[in-house]
Amino acid sequence: MHAEYVLEMKNISKTFPGVRALNNVQLKVKKGTVHALMGENGAGKSTLMKILIGMYRPDGGTIKFKGKEVKFKSTHDALQAGISMIHQELSPVPYMTIAENIFLGRESLYKKTFWVNDREMERKTEELLKQLEISLNPKMKMKELSTAYTQMVEIAKAISYNSELIIMDEPTSAITEREVEHLFKIIEWLKKKGVSIIYISHKMDEIFKIADEITVFRDGSYVDTCSVKNITKEKLIEMMVGREITQLFPKEEAEIGKVLLEIKNFTRAGKFYDINLKVRKGEILGLAGLMGSGRSEIMESLFGVVKADKGEIYIKGKQVHINSPADAIKHKLAFLTEDRKISGLFLPLSVKDNMYISSINNYIEKLFINSKKVNKDCEEEVKLLNIKTPGLDQIVNNLSGGNQQKVLIARWLLTDPDILILDEPTRGIDVGAKAEIHRLMSKLAKQGKAIIMISSELPEILGMSDRIVVMHEGKITGELTRKEATQEKIMSYATGAAS
Amino acid sequence: MNNLANKTSIKNNKHEINKKDKIKILFRRHGMALVLLAMVVLMTVLSPAFLTTRNLMNVVRQISVIAIIGFGVTMVIITTGIDLSSGSVLALAGVIATSFAHPNQYPLIVSIIVGLLVGAIAGSINGAFTAFGEIPAFIPTLGMMIAARGFALIFSDGRPITNLSESFEFIGGGYFLGVPFPIYVMLLTAVISHILLKHTKFGRYIYAIGGNAQAAVVSGINVRKYLVLVYTYAGLLSGLAGIVLASRLSAGQPTAGVSYELDAIASAVIGGTSLSGGVGTIPGTIIGALIMGVLNNGLDLLQVSAYWQQVLKGAIIVGAVLLDKKKNR
Ligand SMILES: Nc1ncnc2c1ncn2[C@@H]1O[C@H](COP(=O)(O)OP(=O)(O)OP(=O)(O)O)[C@@H](O)[C@H]1O
Ligand SMILES: [Mg+2]
């Protein structure tokens, strides 16, 4: 009867202690289509996918795959049946090779022995990567790869199972436009082979480019399913957040004052060379460039995480020496890092602990922590940033990806910084919350703070920056004012074509 | 408008914590306490000698030394480290402290300070190698375990140091208000450790380092400094345990405390401390130590042969932790 549907999930519910993640939702995916799953942070998208592949047991509901009812007990079962997933949070085994990672759990063996056949695995991997036009050597260790390439390998891995349904949970949150295009080419190719795809992303442009149908969730409930042809961006946003969002980039004019921070002749061999940057009071400076252009590395060195070989830092005109992040915090710098799992979150700790760890000195009274004050301030941040959590004591690992990002933003706001370095501040954040964070950035600038924002999303750079500095292979190749800047100009500097 | 909508949704979420959840959460938080309770009930039924004040006090006194070490070990494990040297450091601190504790020699406080100092120095060496040498704690603490035992034997010439002052012997053997004195020492250490861990910056940083060392660096934490401090504190407590034990044995034994580090680690882990870091509490470790204590005592009372006791103990430790993991799914 429903032969056209490869997947039908009905009446699915799931409750975690204190959180109702899914409430009677449904999802129907047609064969050979790209089906987008949309919704705000914490809407339950990842949870539904984890139920589908057997990682979580649903409280109720039915799942039909290829017309037959299924109940997967583990991801292994799901893979066997033909469903693979690219997870929102990457999980490579860093000290193993690309080939070993791709064939993890199903290693090729020499005939009738227990002996792992590395050569066979490497050959197959090489074939796969070639087919997908990813130029990497299968013998490379995962830890040598950039985040973008790690993501590409995860994509290749999901495809290597020859699944009929591939779930992609925010596959583009860690890669730049170039890789996104590459991924879309792969998706088109998969579609032609009859593979169906469930695609989760907060990036509107992508959805309208690649998806055939869209299902929207809100607060754990099903809202609607419709064809991409029959919907506008505005309508879709309204379905997701339940209200209209009038302004996507609420940039307000702030009074731009004296230079707050200046770096001179900053150099770290192999990463960046002779960097001179200035940022003023009330200014948002956008740093644009491709993956690996050295933007994050400069900020790491500025913040004292990894020392630069050479260069000076001036704050309010005075030279300072920053040898560790503790020094940087003392000079009222804040650094929201690009990878929240690796260098941001304390996953086993509570929301509260994650928030006040960097401003802990403000809460110490006679050696002890004043919990009341901590609670009060953290509650305020939760409200200010609209963080969805059942309480301050929730383990941060249990929050949805976007809400984890907001917890990190709260951490730095609590340090009351003068200069904020925001590396991909809205990665994995939904449209509504994104606008809120942008509004917050405007507000902070108006209060006289200086902001350096790194972003791989050109609309965000164009929409929020007063001034844009573009980098290419470790060097600054161009600088544009808000008025001059266009997508094309930035790209030509970023690819090195203009210099 | 938007704010309002959000507030109500947060409220709704809170209301959804129903009875079933509550029981789940209760069990999740206090699973090991329930295991302990079950063991106590079982023993009360099986042996009339178990539930007497004297016997219970005996159990607690017996675990006090392990528990004191265990508090430091708990902190070390929360940072994703390990301390294998506790037993040997205990012995070294014991022999050195006792050599300052002969009758009419020095005031009591001198031997105590010497014992604590020996422990703290050994611990700080462990910490320095782990933090600055950037080698896994297993290696420096294994080295310390072997070397400290050697020093204890050298210092004492392989013989127990006896003839101790009465006041020194009171620490491990005396009674106060009818309760063995070591129990007070243990409780005091527990309270201090708990406060350190839960209510001070030091404690927050320990959890943060174990939760994600790289994020700790970026958050402005001087990870190396705090690692050295944690191991120093663990060493200090081993020194304290050494004093208590030597006092109770009325001798500084260079061979005392063999494999105590393993009992301490077991207590911490049974009590819910995660070997992968970031998770653990002092009350948990007390419960872990009590479970081990009741187990030892119970098997004695039931007159299980010493050999079988070992087998059962091993099995029960693994079983208890397994049970604890299961309920988290
Ligand atoms: N293991 C868990 N324990 C407790 N709560 C959880 C757990 N996993 C998810 N949740 C909660 O369930 C809700 C749905 O989370 P989910 O990760 O599915 O959101 P999402 O739609 O994928 O959001 P995002 O876009 O931010 O990734 C959230 O409120 C989250 O806090
Ligand atoms: Mg998600």
Image: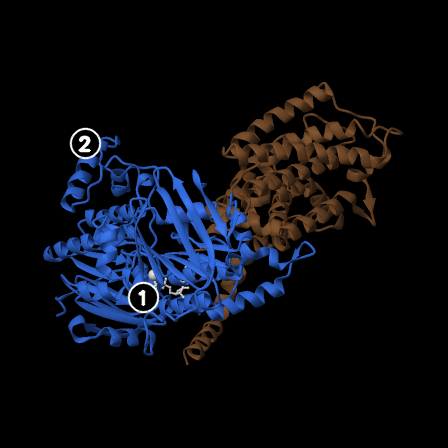
Chain colours: A blue, B brown
**Mark 2 belongs to which subunit?**
A
Q: Give amino acid for label 2.
A: Lys
Q: Is mark 2 within 8 Å of ligand 2?
A: no
Q: Quadrant of ligand 2?
A: bottom left
Q: Residue at x 34, y 53 (%)?
A: A89
Question: Crowding at label 1, few (<14), some or many (≥20) Cα neighbours within 10 Å?
Answer: some
Q: Which residue is mark 2?
A: A111
Q: Is mark 1 within 8 Å of ligand 1?
A: no
**Mark 1 belongs to which subunit?**
A
For the view shown, which residue lies furthest in the bottom direction? Answer: B1
Question: Left of B305 or right of it: where is A141?
Answer: left
Q: Give amino acid for label 1.
A: Gly
Question: Crowding at label 2, few (<14), some or many (≥20) Cα neighbours within 10 Å?
Answer: few
User: Quick check: can you spot residue A151?
Assistant: yes
Q: Which mark is residue A463?
A: 1
Q: In the picture, residue B147 is in which quadrant?
A: top right
Tell me the element at label 2: loop
Q: Earlier in the sequence, mark 2 or mark 1?
A: 2
